[in-house]
Image (cartoon, rainbow, N blue to C red):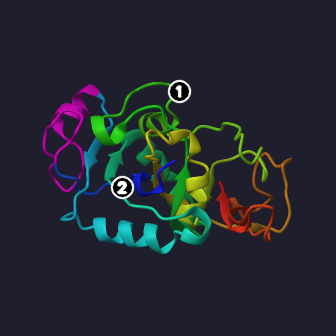
Amino acid sequence: MCKCKRQSNALLSSPDKFGQCLVCKAPTHGGLPVCGGCQNVGHVVFASLDQTHPKYEGIVQQFMKKWDSGVSGQVKLVAIFGVYNANSYAKYQAYCSKLSASGFLNERRLFHGCGARCHLWATRRLCGSPSCVRCSICESGFRHQPSKFNKLQFGKGHYFAFDSSKSDCYSLDSDIGGYRTMLLCKVAMGRSEILKQDRPELTQPPNGMNSVLAEIGPMSKLWQGRPEVVV
């Protein structure tokens, strides 16, 4: 793998203005990434974020600050895309409201590494293939699926990381021509149970908790010792 060509496409799911939709080519309006064409035919709005976008610099800074070149080598951020799925976002907002009512939202922006089967950076379009995990998440949201990397080390759930270099290790299946992708997601952690050891038997957070925060010390691979969140 040529590390200088490695790519990380930070896919930000957020109701911000993206510009032109790459699905139907219509411009967004009203401050939301929803164009009339996509809204009518049920498309997920997918658009490119350039350096003029208000969130561009913050995404780049977060990605590079959380990248450990000593563990994962050098990296170049090639492209950033924005994704807005109205159905998924409505469910997320409802969950956030529930957590806020309980007095503990604890919302973070975290990385998620996953596999891919298409050249997203070249086609500028979600492929729609069920085998492309990245595009499936963008189109249908997260689904509970076993991970061959950690074998559900902390139980059943959706895994996120604070460090981009850790999520990169879960993006091996998206390495196409030296380019990799990962997602940058808003995550409502709520109340987190801190884990100091493996808990593969968990099927939900412990009583009274909304997520688990794994803080296991250094293991055989350095990146495995970095904190990750399971919701």
Kind of residue at disc 1: Ser
Task: Identify which residue, 17 or 36, lies in the foreground.
Answer: 17
Measured Cα–Cα span from mark 2 to mark 1: 24 Å
Residue assigned mark 2: 14
Which residues lie in the magenta part? 20-41
Nearer the viewer's eye, disc 2 or disc 1? 1
Residue 65 in the image: state x and y as whole percent. 47, 75
CA neighbours of label 2 inside 10 A, class few (<14), some (14 to 19), many (20+):
some
User: Which corner quadrant of the image does residue 126 belong to?
Assistant: top left
Q: Please give the residue where the numbered disc 1 appears in the rendered image.
A: 131
Position of 46 relative to 65 (above/below): above
Residue at the image position 32 percent from the left and 50 percent from the top: 81
Quadrant of image for the C terminus: bottom right
Q: Position of residue 96 (x, y in %)?
A: 51, 59
Q: What residue is drawn where x is 57% and y is 56%?
A: 167
Seen in the picture, residue 144 relative to 211 is either above or below; the reply is above
Q: Identity of the amino acid at label 2?
A: Ser
The numbered mark, 2 or 1, whose residue comes first in the sequence reads 2
Query: At numbered mark 1, what does the secondary structure look like: helix, strand or loop?
Result: loop
In this rendering, the answer to whether 137 lies above or below 75 is above
Quick check: 80 left or right of 92?
Answer: left
Counting from the top left corner in percent of width and height, residue 21 is at 21, 42
Q: Picture coordinates of residue 121 (x, y %)?
A: 32, 43
